[in-house]
Amino acid sequence: MPNPHLSILVVDDAKFSSAVIGRALTQAGYQDLRFASSAAEAIRLLEQRPASVLLADWLMPEINGLELTEQVRQFDEMTHHYTYIILLTGKEGENVLGEAFDSGVDDFINKAAMSEQLVPRVFAADRLCNTLQRLLQENRLLTGNIASLEQRNLVDPLTGLGNHRYLQQRMLDSLRQVESRGGALCYLMIGLQDVHDLRQQHGERFYNELLSGVARRLQQLVRPLDILVRLDEMHFGLIAMLEDLHECSPSSFKRLHEGINLKAFKTSEGFISLKAGISLIGLDSKGLPCTPQALQEHAAELLPDSYSSGLVTAQRLPLPR
């Protein structure tokens, strides 16, 4: 049984032809019929409301059926919709079929056989449209679910550490803890200065192997309650909660700096030495209010000094005026 609410748009510059098509489809049970006398008018109607099936004459003035098909396909991409396009033509031959299908046409009807072919072809389009629209809807739901999962994801898949989103959450919690219970927060940004060049030289597999090794080394060097995350392709972050702000100093994290810089990493390409920089930002309740973003920005500004000096660079908040 046909779907009486199937949206059909008929595009033909010949009024008589449109009337014949309209009468045949109405008798077949279709009720949602619209008519356009040109491709430009058809586009305007589609912008107002998409159609499930488009029946268009191939040969029309100004914009022909193939050109209209290309415009409709672009419109479909923007609206996440699919329009089933049937061209009406008097042309014949395999080349005609190839040209039509290459342009994105789904089917076409020879005008000489339209009385016999029109309704059966629309019936077939009707069945396919139900499937196509359902698949599009399922794809939209799947895409939405994936985006939702990514928004909630807090783990870096390569290293198993927390990711940047996790850092934001834990840093906010840590700042609240400093405000309510006292103590000090120490945030370290660890940058791998030459990892980009090594990635270019040895490839992605080596890079993943090396970053996983760095993550394991860092986990061995930090305290059990410290919060270690992978920020991006060449940076790690660390939150350490301390009793006193004076503990938040380069000497407290000298072992961490030396553990990355002075001990090579065993990889499939042999032993690889890295040059890492570490910047450190510390604050206690006197440094509040402060946002996670501000802490990270201060650390990023200090990191180049660590690269150039070969030392841990540190700063305490609030900054002196």
Image (cartoon, rainbow, N blue to C red):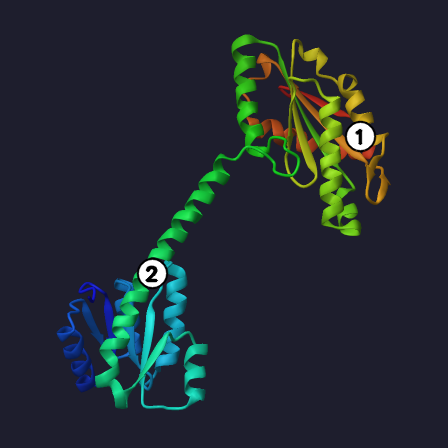
Image quadrant of residue 245? Answer: top right
Q: Amino acid at mark 1?
A: Ile
Question: Which mark's residue is nearer the viewer, 1 or 2?
Answer: 2
User: Helix, strand or loop at disc 2?
Assistant: helix
Judge by depth and name the residue closer to the eye, 99 or 201. Answer: 99
Residue at x-position 17% and y-position 65%: 4
Image quadrant of residue 287? Answer: top right
Extreme residue in the front direction: 1
Label 2: few (<14), some or many (≥20) within 10 Å? few
Residue 306, how many percent across, how many down? 77, 31
Label 1: few (<14), some or many (≥20) within 10 Å? many
**Vertical arrangement, residue 216 with respect to residue 133, above or below:** above
Residue 178 visible from this viewpoint: yes
Question: Relative to 313, is 150 on the left or the right?
Answer: left
The residue to which callout 2 is attached is 131
Judge by depth and name the residue closer to the eye, 224 or 181. Answer: 224
**Vertical arrangement, residue 225 with respect to residue 114, above or below:** above
The residue to which callout 1 is attached is 260
Image quadrant of residue 224? Answer: top right
